[in-house]
Image: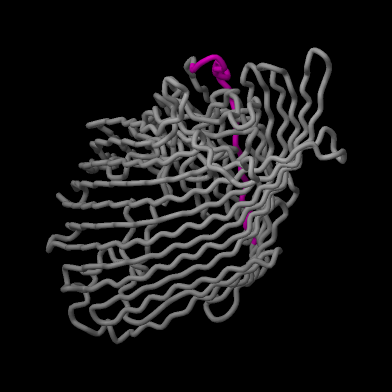
Amino acid sequence: EIITNPGAKYDASGGTSGILNIVLKKNLKAGYNGNIRAGIDQRGKYNLGGDINVKQGKFNVFASGNYNQRKSISDGNTSRYTSFGTPDSLLQHDHNINNGYFLFGRAGVDYLIDNRNTISLTGNIVHGHFDPTTGSDLYVDTLLPTGTTYSYTRRFSTTTSNFRNRGAMLSFTHNFPKSGEQWTADLNYSSGSNDNFNSITSDIYNVKDGPLSSIYRQQQVGNGTNKYFTAQTDYTLPINEKSKIEAGARIAIRHTDNLSNLDTVGPNNEFVVEQLLSSKYSYKDEVYAGYVTYSNAIGNFGYQLGLRAEGSNYNGTQNYTDFDAAGNQIPSVGHFSNSYPVNLFPSVFLTQKLGGNQDLSFNYTRRIDRPTFFQLFPFTDYSDSLNLSRGNPNLKPQFTNSFELGYSKSFAGNNSLLASAYYKHTTDLITRESTVGVNPVNDSSVIINTYINAKSSFVGGFEVISRNSLTKWWDLTTSVNIFTSKINTIDTGEFAVASQGETWAWFGKLNNSFRITKAFTLQLTGDYTSKTVLPPGGSASTGGNQGRGFGPTSSGNANGYTKPSGGVDASVRYEFLKNKAASITLSVNDIFRTRVNDVYINGGTYTQEADRRRDPQFFRLQFNWKFGKMDMNMFKRKSLKGEQNSLEGIGSGGPSSKE
């Protein structure tokens, strides 16, 4: 289920976006069931996967695994004019190929202690390996008073990246004699590591195809570890058929270490560590939470009131190299931290049934977005010498108050209409900012991409979703979202630029499903997003860059916007075997090669436009087969009801989902 405005029961993080609450089916039958899947894409990369669930007596055993290969190809162009210092213009073309694979495994067991208590143990393993390579052509025109000088650089970058993760979860469920009364407890621990090696060689010419003037080489060696622990407990107490109280508590602790060394070629043609550009960093954050909700209904009017309290703090330590009074390099240690002892997050949900299959609803929540590790990380990433990236350790969490008014109506023939108006106001918005700086490696003017806390922002709009069965063979889902947004920035220095004015934008999507025959189904989807400064979800999903490629995205851009983009995708599915147990699906994305991420930035002393396009007109073929056999004799026992009660919260693939 999609929850656009989650209440107090759920984690308060993710202030401007909704959540997907995955509700698993409950399988009470003894026996086994599972799924096997396999696929291949147009570049010959394949995927394999499967799930199995076996239930017999007091034990329910489950396992799943996936192996996915990937070869992704993307092209990008950057054009920039800089008036800071010596004016120059840059034209850059990048061609990136990313080869790699991803492996995931999960297994566990549920043990039904008795008809009211169940304990579950789950373990998982994750491993990934990727080898991206990027070839770049860079043309720089330097506008000197004596005339224009030219430079062409052919840059080649290779990277090897590995990551590993291991985790375990222990869960306990107790069902009380009173129907619906339940207590659950969960412990979750995971530990991961990563290592990365990046090598960059730049051949520099005065003009393309001319004599080589110089060679610049650098490499980055990095590794890190992370540990994550959560403990959660939830209790549900029904008061009567219409009212209930829910309460719970949660603790989450994360600890991350990272080491990054940047090496350049020294006098003896050997790589030497650049101490000023290298860093060792550790980071720890803690979140403590508790919540209570009360829900009831009076006639056709229903309501839920909730309050969540969360306290959080984070602190980091950075080892780096500084200078003493005599100009000598000395090792130094920097500390930074931020603490929010207690924050309250109220939520209100009201629903009124109007008759005629109509509902009117209103909800309000307060939520939070805390800065991610890579947004806080103060080390500068020099992998692209003309576009540096670094975090901001002084970032504060952002808080969002969300209001939503909705109307829904169901019509005959599987038709429905959902209309909603929303408004979201955020303080201390974490947003991207780009400034002009100097690369200490070669003293060149560069763009530094970082993050700031803007004063505030707001997003408000109106959305309509219509689901219609136009004929027996054609289903159509239409959604249109019209919204306005604005980011109010602060003066962050010499290169800060005032916010873009309030802008209006819109997003539209059409999803067609055609039943060609009983076995064949065709799906055709199109979407379009207009020029956008801050998307409604706040995640910059229409063109945002993730922080260093990891974690949630920041919200919008303080001194730029994303240009319009859209595309069309299609898939055809053939179902066969008894009860349509097997299927083959052929899909293609971005049929007309129109989906592109194109971001424009005006930094006052520079303007830049960067576009990126990845894997257009890409085909995939996927096979899926469901199997299973249930023992119906299991249901001849007298105490069937008792076993059903004991299985509350147990899904066919393990414990029921939480947040």
In the image, farthest residue toward the top = 145
Locate residue 291: give its quadrant.
top left
Of 483 and 380, nearer the camera is 380
Q: Position of residue 464 (x, y in %)?
A: 53, 38
The number of discs equals 0
| On screen, residue 461 above or below 296 | above
Q: Residue at x 43, y 22 (%)?
A: 456
Q: Position of residue 537 (x, y in %)?
A: 48, 37
Q: Is 501 colored magenta in this rendering? A: yes
Magenta residues span 492-514
Q: Is residue 426 left or right of residue 518?
A: left
Q: Position of residue 51 (x, y in %)?
A: 44, 73
The answer, for residue 290, to whether it is visible in the render is yes
In the image, farthest residue toward the right = 210
Q: Is residue 472 left or right of residue 364?
A: right
| On screen, residue 133 above or below 202 | below
| On screen, residue 16 above or below 631 | above
Q: Residue at x 28, y 35 (%)?
A: 313
Of 82 and 462, nearer the camera is 82
Of 217 and 628, nearer the camera is 217
Locate residue 483: give its quadrant.
top right
Q: Is 164 colored magenta in this rendering? A: no
In the image, farthest residue toward the left = 177
Q: Position of residue 297 (x, y in %)?
A: 24, 43
**How is colour applied across the structure in the image?**
one colour
Q: Is residue 479 left or right of residue 141?
A: left
The answer, for residue 94, to whether it is visible in the render is no
